[in-house]
């Protein structure tokens, strides 16, 4: 054997050793889940909770792909977690692995097909089953990884609130990693909206270079030089319908982000949920003046109000913009960089931008908040006084 082939063998050996050590199995086990509820904003809330849960149980979290719904497509599309977010900042906080990598290099070692059980709180639909793959996106999600379940585990009365009642220890006692190396959940092991204690975990979410660079390019190439105000207008038909019931759901969706988790800062109003044109122009004018903004960036799920806002602010030296082909994640990354942000308190999409801004100490406001009302909300019955 000559020196050359010897060195090739050495390189091979090195690669094998390196790859193996890179894929060490976590003796404390893994957590898998389907982000099966809602769109990006909801999934992000659920992600923060799941990260907190995995940290408390000291299991590795498999980073699930984001579940997206494309117009005209009958099945959800699964986008790898790392397409949108960097891996390293999460890894400095806790053990995580992209679900694609888990399935490829860990699952064959510790999760044989014959032992793949799925976890849910209780059985569904009169069966003895979690029905983890029934419907969209449940089926398409697990099929992305060719996962089928041979049985169900009902974990009730345990819950996901690891910040109280010594819950993590209870999970680890009942489902020890020796017997249960993988806890695979039908949905996120987390609450919606994100639990108060988990909000700060947002600091570990950093946009991937792909997304961040698109946001930076837009700000540099499309917006005029100078400060800008970012706004989020949530006004699709589905949203209007949800807002009709706002008086009866004082903490609908992400309302806690401005009202507090116990409604200590008031109750949700129509103006906060679906602000009037008057409220929008009034608050926007104030913000433009205060921050001496040269432009306004608008993100919306439906109507960006560009002509209306351009007209309403025509006496101010400011231009109104949106992305030519809006992409929600790039919108969020732009909103996160604005000098001031006004969002929708009820929306989990707004909540994402707001949390990211809080990480960097940037100011944010909400439409119709604080509410201009003299009526004082009655405390709910279970609320502490
Ligand atoms: C968490 O698990 C890792 C192994 O993945 C172990 O090295 C570490 O000591 C554990 N931490 C705690 C606090 O138990
Ligand atoms: C509050 O609302 C009332 C009636 O809608 C209005 O007259 C008043 O100017 C508002 N106050 C503030 C501070 O916006």
Image (spheres, rainbow, N blue to C red):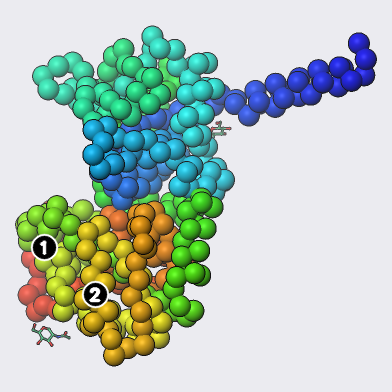
Q: Above or below — where is 130 with respect to 260? A: above
Please state the horizontal and vertical placement of residue 104, each as a whole percent of the image: 51, 23
- Of all residues, the one furthest to the bottom in this rendering is 315
Kindly identify which residue carries mark 1. 379
Splitting the image into four quadrants, where does ligand 2 fall? bottom left
Judged left or right of residue 366, residue 230 is right
Q: Quadrant of the N terminus?
A: top right
Question: How far apart are the alpha carbons under marks 1 and 2?
Answer: 42 Å
Residue 204 appears anywhere in the view = no
Judged left or right of residue 344, residue 20 is right
Q: Above or below — where is 273 with respect to 229? A: above
Can you tell which quarter of the image residue 68 is in?
A: top left
| Secondary element type, mark 2 | helix
Respond yes or no on whether mark 1 lies under 8 Å from ligand 2.
Answer: no
Kindly identify which residue carries mark 2. 307
Can you tell which quarter of the image residue 74 is in?
A: top left
Q: Above or below — where is 93 with respect to 196? A: above
Please tell me which residue is depicted at 24% across the width and 74% down the height of the picture: 307
């Amino acid at each position: 054997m000559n020196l050359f082939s010897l060195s090739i063998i050495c390189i091979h050996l090195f690669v094998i050793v390196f790859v193996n050590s890179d894929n060490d199995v976590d003796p404390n086990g893994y957590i898998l889940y389907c982000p099966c509820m809602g769109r990006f904003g909801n999934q992000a809330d659920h992600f923060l909770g799941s990260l907190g849960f995995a940290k408390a149980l000291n299991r590795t979290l498999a980073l699930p792909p984001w579940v997206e719904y494309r117009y005209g497509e009958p099945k959800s599309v699964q986008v790898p977690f790392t397409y949108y977010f960097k891996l390293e900042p999460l890894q400095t906080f806790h053990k995580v692995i992209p679900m694609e990598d888990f399935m490829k290099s860990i699952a064959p070692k510790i999760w044989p097909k014959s032992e793949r059980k799925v976890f849910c709180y209780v059985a569904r639909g009169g069966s003895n089953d979690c029905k983890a793959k029934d419907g969209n996106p449940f089926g398409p999600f697990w099929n992305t990884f060719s996962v089928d379940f041979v049985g169900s585990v009902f974990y009730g009365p345990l819950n996901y609130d690891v910040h109280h009642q010594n819950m993590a220890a209870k999970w680890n006692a009942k489902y020890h990693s020796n017997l249960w190396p993988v806890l695979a959940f039908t949905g996120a092991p987390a609450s919606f909206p994100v639990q108060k204690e988990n909000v700060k975990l947002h600091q570990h979410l950093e946009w991937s270079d792909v997304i961040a660079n698109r946001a930076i390019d837009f700000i540099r190439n499309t917006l005029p030089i100078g400060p800008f105000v970012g706004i989020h207008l949530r006004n699709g038909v589905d949203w209007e319908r949800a807002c009709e019931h706002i008086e009866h759901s004082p903490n609908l969706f992400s309302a806690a982000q401005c009202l507090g988790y116990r409604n200590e800062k008031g109750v949700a109003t129509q103006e906060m949920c679906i602000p009037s044109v008057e409220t929008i122009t009034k608050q926007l004018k104030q913000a433009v003046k205060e921050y001496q903004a040269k432009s306004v960036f608008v993100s919306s799920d439906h109507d960006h109000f560009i002509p209306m806002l351009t007209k309403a602010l025509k006496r101010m030296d400011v231009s109104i913009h949106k992305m030519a082909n809006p992409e929600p994640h790039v919108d969020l990354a732009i909103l996160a960089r604005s000098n001031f942000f006004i969002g929708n308190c009820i929306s989990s999409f707004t909540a994402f931008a707001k949390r990211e801004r809080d990480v960097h100490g940037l100011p944010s406001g909400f439409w119709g908040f604080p509410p201009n009302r003299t009526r004082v909300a009655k405390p709910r019955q279970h609320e502490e006084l």
